[in-house]
Image (spheres, rainbow, N blue to C red):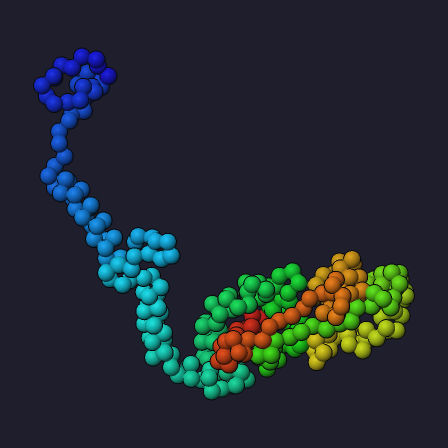
Amino acid sequence: MAHDNPWPNEGNTGHIWDEDIRELDNPPPLWWMLAYYAGFVMIIFYVLYYPALPGPTSHTAGLAGWTQVKEYHEDFKVLTDWRSEKFAVQEQALTSKSVEEILADKNLVNYAVATSKALFGDYCAGCHGSGGMGNVGYPILADDDWLYGGDVNALYQTLVNGRVGNMPGYGAMLSEQQVSDAADFVIAMSNGKADDAAVAAGRDVYNTIGCAGCHMPDGSGMAALGAAKLNDKVWRFSGDKAEVMKTIKHGVNAVGDKNTRPALMPAFAERLGDKEVKRLAIYVHSLGGGQ
């Protein structure tokens, strides 16, 4: 930048580069200044017309009476009115038909599945994971292993009434060695090795304390009681031996045991209504685990 200004009367700022490139000091164009002042006018208009200024407990309402919540409800009503008109036949069918009748209608199943993804995300995915893939301590819905049965009526009843798991704890009845032996047998059963001589002691414990009464002698479980299958590799809580021992010791929802496994699913009939429960039952059935 030159220190001498060869153009002193040109109206430049005196900032000159490469001998002749200089910065002029001309006023902005009129249109630009008008737009600039108009911006201040628009600020005043905005503050008066829309809610803008905060107060101790609320804010200025604005001359328009506009709020984002009000606009949301108006737009949502437009959407629901459009849906009610366009899909009136399908919605009426979901209301009037049973889940079995809905399942028999392929088009209605497709509609129920398409319209329940957001519903599942809002009410189910927090525990059962996106797409029903499960979370720690919560059952997978995308397999074919069910505590209470996976046919569409069983799924519907689960959603209507909720479920409360139940298994007594045996920590006070069994020694630490017996609990360990029983855990070894359950793990061996899950691996198809229930007949191995190495787990004979655990097999005796399993049969003596009555595990077979709910989980069946072969570990196939009993859906009527919500007793889990033990002869597959699907674990309600965990297949780690320490975790299996914890379940045997403290049970599930065992009264008075602070270390018991919590297993509770709320009922959704009152919260969502029958039609939405049917919609969810069809969706869960479609995840790949429906029988």
The quarter of the picture where residue 178 lies is bottom right
- Residue 78 appears in the figure: yes
Residue at the outermost top position:
4
Residue drawn 73% across the image and 69% down it: 252
- Nearest to the observer: residue 246 or residue 148: 246
Q: Position of residue 60 (x, y in %)?
A: 30, 57
Answer left or right for 283 relative to 256.
left
* Quadrant location of the N terminus in the rendered image: top left
Q: Position of residue 31 (x, y in %)?
A: 12, 41
Answer left or right for 114 relative to 149.
left
Residue at the outermost front position:
56
Answer left or right for 248 relative to 288.
right
| Residue 246 higher or lower than 277, as above or below | above
* Quadrant location of the C terminus in the rendered image: bottom right
Residue drawn 11% across the image and 17% down it: 7
Q: Position of residue 76 (x, y in %)?
A: 35, 69
Residue drawn 18% across the image and 42% down it: 36
- Residue 104 appears in the figure: no
Answer left or right for 260 relative to 37.
right
- Nearest to the observer: residue 185 or residue 123: 123
The quarter of the picture where residue 64 lies is bottom left
Q: How many marks?
A: 0
Residue drawn 16% across the image and 43% down it: 37
